[in-house]
């Protein structure tokens, strides 16, 4: 009887060990499989277009790139913070730093990819200096791009602003034509062109509205703009193998040439 009990006990122990090993193996396989999927969020143009270009490159390295396109870029950082995606590609560092500060987040940039020069557009004017006194100008509503727009208007000679990183409309120190500066959701800026004299528009939204930043803008940022769009991740994931694979794939000479050829200078490589 003791021998039978001992044998049965040994069988149960062995079964438990095998079951545990099987579960671990299944879990490990799932983990390994997950590490080969790169979930990235982006706005459609030009970010998602550039990402589509590197899908085949990553596939050769054993990675699957899943691109989620967001119509509202304000949702991209919360999605990254919540772990719904592994990385995002839509913002420049000043925007990311402002988000981190206001939301107590810990996002970091892992790679500069391109610059989208911000431009000043109009449906009625041929030159920015033709604007009449009291006219309205629309700019992006978020702090970083709003600051960027105000600096561009200052460079164009329409207003003067203090030399600081973050600017508000109330910070304007000189406005000789008494221009009305209105903050609008960035995506809606092209729609305001029917009603205002000038609008300062991010290139991605200009492109979506069929505006050519090189041909249609009256005044644009110079090539040394610090507002390069970056791939961002949560702090601590900078050295993840799949993130390193993503960075390697998007910084090749082939991608640089694609950006130059596809966007004709409206989007400029930053690597």
Image (cartoon, rainbow, N blue to C red):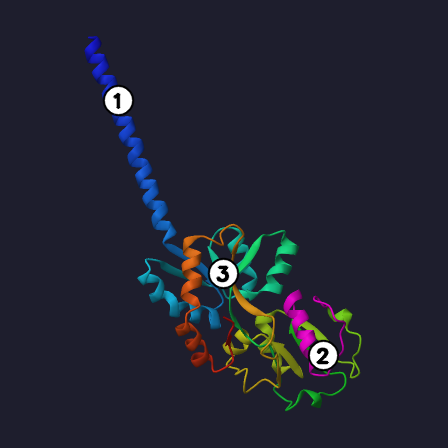
- Percent x, y of residue 99: 62, 58
For the point 25% across and 25% down, the residue is 14
Q: Residues within 10 Å of mark 2 (few under 14, many from 20)?
A: some
Q: Which residue is mark 3?
A: 88
Q: Please give left or right for residue 24 compared with residue 89 in the image.
A: left
| Residue 129 visible in image | yes
Depicted 185 relative to depicted 80: above or below? below
Mark 3 or mark 2: name the one nearer the start of the chain.
Answer: 3
Left or right: 92 as drawn, with respect to 23:
right
Looking at the figure, which quarter contains the N terminus?
Answer: top left
Q: Which residue is mark 2?
A: 154
- Marks 3 and 2 in Cβ contact (< 8 Å): no
Q: Residue 12 shows which numbered tag?
A: 1
Left/right placement of residue 51 relative to residue 137 reads left
Q: Give the extent of the magenta segment.
A: 141-167
In terms of depth relative to the viewer, which is nearer, 145 or 210? 145
């Amino acid at each position: 009887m003791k021998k039978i009990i001992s044998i049965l006990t040994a069988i149960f122990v062995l079964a438990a060990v095998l079951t545990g090993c099987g579960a671990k193996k299944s879990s490990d396989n799932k983990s390994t499989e997950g590490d080969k999927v790169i979930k990235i969020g982006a706005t459609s143009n030009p970010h998602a277009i550039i990402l589509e270009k590197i899908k085949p490159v990553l596939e050769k390295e054993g990675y699957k790139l899943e691109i989620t396109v967001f119509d509202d870029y304000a949702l991209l950082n919360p999605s990254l913070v919540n772990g719904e995606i592994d990385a995002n590609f839509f913002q420049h560092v000043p925007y990311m730093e402002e988000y981190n500060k206001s939301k107590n987040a810990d996002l970091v940039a892992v790679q500069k990819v391109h610059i989208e020069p911000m431009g000043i557009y109009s449906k009625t004017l041929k030159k920015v200096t033709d604007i009449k006194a009291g006219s309205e100008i629309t700019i992006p509503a978020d702090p970083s791009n709003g600051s960027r727009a105000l600096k561009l208007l200052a460079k164009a000679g329409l207003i003067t602003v203090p030399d600081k990183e973050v600017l508000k409309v109330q910070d304007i120190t000189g406005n000789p034509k008494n221009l009305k500066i209105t903050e609008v959701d960035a995506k809606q800026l092209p729609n305001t062109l029917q009603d205002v004299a000038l609008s300062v528009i991010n290139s991605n939204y200009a492109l979506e509205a069929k505006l050519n930043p090189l041909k249609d803008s009256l005044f644009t940022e110079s090539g040394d703009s610090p507002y390069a769009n970056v791939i961002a991740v949560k702090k601590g994931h900078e050295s993840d193998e799949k993130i390193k694979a993503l960075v390697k794939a998007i910084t090749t000479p082939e991608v640089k040439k694609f950006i130059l050829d596809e966007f004709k200078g409206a989007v400029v490589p930053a690597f």
